[in-house]
Image (tube, grey):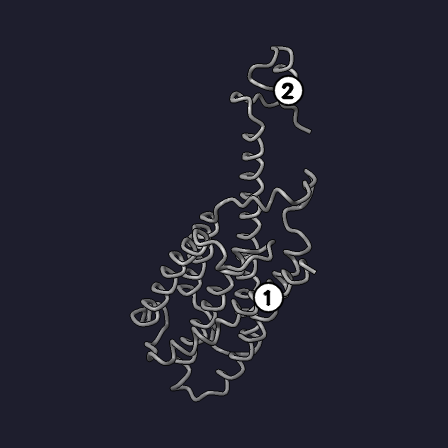
Amino acid sequence: QVGLSMGTGTSVAKEASDITLLDDSFHSIATAVMWGRSLYKNIQRFIVFQLTINVVALASVLLGAFFGTELPLTVTQMLWVNLIMDTFAAMALASIPPSADVMNEKPRKTDDFIITKAMRKNILGVGFCFLAILMTLIVIIKQMPADLVGQALTQFFTIFVMLQFWNLFNASVFGTNHSVFKDSRHALGMLSVAIIILVGQILIVEFGGKVFRTEPMNFMTWVYIIAGTSFVLWIGEIYRWIKRIQKKD
């Protein structure tokens, strides 16, 4: 519990309270609560996105070794993935403006763990689906002729990044039933970071060479990978649309 007092209140009331409202408006404290809750939710979204990448990346490398294939992701590729995870994702999720919807949520307990049950389900569920896709690709790559492995591993790396790319949009609305495209300010901030990630991935694949163990891909391969991995976003949109309908009923 937090005690509040007005700026024009008595000195006794001010001393007994935890917070003094200098402008004598309870709207100020409501705004502060909204910002605090929104910031907390953005941190949770970042954790969901980050842990999903970590689970998938570590499991892919570990299981790839058991399958006896060449290292699915190199150290330099992982550095790029971590740059996406720690820098660009933080920029995107931190740019999400506060939402008044958080004021409709019940107050959480001070000792509540920041990773909720819903977050664990999302991390494990999405992570398992991504891992199943990537392991299938690894099995296919293992059966390929040696001269095609380089191109296949480049496509594997790009598919891995693009799965996380689309999942970033879903993570940005985690904890709500809103569409990614509902708020223009939200969409613009996410789009700006998404363009940086996409351009960076294209440059690494096309010009990374031996440093990133990549080979250039033709235009249609890029189209197939980007369009094919976008199912991550559309499944998320359909799921949230169904939840909105159920809430109305």
Residues tagged 1 and 2 counted as in contact (Cβ below 8 A): no
Amino acid at dot 1 = Val
Q: Secondary structure at mark 2?
A: loop
x, y (%) of residue 194?
Answer: 40, 60
Q: Is residue 71 above or below residue 107?
A: below
Q: CA distance from mark 1 to mark 2?
A: 46 Å
Q: How many marks?
A: 2
* Residue 17: image tag: 2
Q: Using the rendered image of the protein, determine whether residue 25 is visible from the camera's viewpoint.
A: yes
Task: Residue at 38% x, 76% y: name it.
Answer: 222
Q: Name the image quarter holding the C terminus.
A: bottom right
Q: Secondary structure at mark 1?
A: helix
Q: Is residue 40 above or below residue 158?
A: above
Quadrant in the rendering for residue 65:
bottom right
Left or right placement of residue 208 versus residue 55 in this view:
left
x, y (%) of residue 91?
Answer: 43, 50
Q: For this rendering, which residue is in front, 52 or 13?
A: 13
Q: Name the image quarter holding the N terminus.
A: top right
Task: Residue at 37% x, 61% y: name it.
Answer: 195
Task: Residue at 54% x, 35% y: name it.
Answer: 31
x, y (%) of residue 185?
Answer: 43, 51
Residue of label 1? 126
Amino acid at dot 2 = Ser
Q: For this rendering, which residue is in front, 62 or 95?
A: 95
Residue that sits furthest to the top in the current view: 11
Left or right placement of residue 90 versus residue 217 in this view:
right
Can you tell which of label 1 and label 2 is closer to the viewer?
2
Q: Is residue 120 above or below residue 4?
A: below
Crowding at dot 1, Cα within 10 Å, few <14 / some 14-19 / many 20+, comes out as many
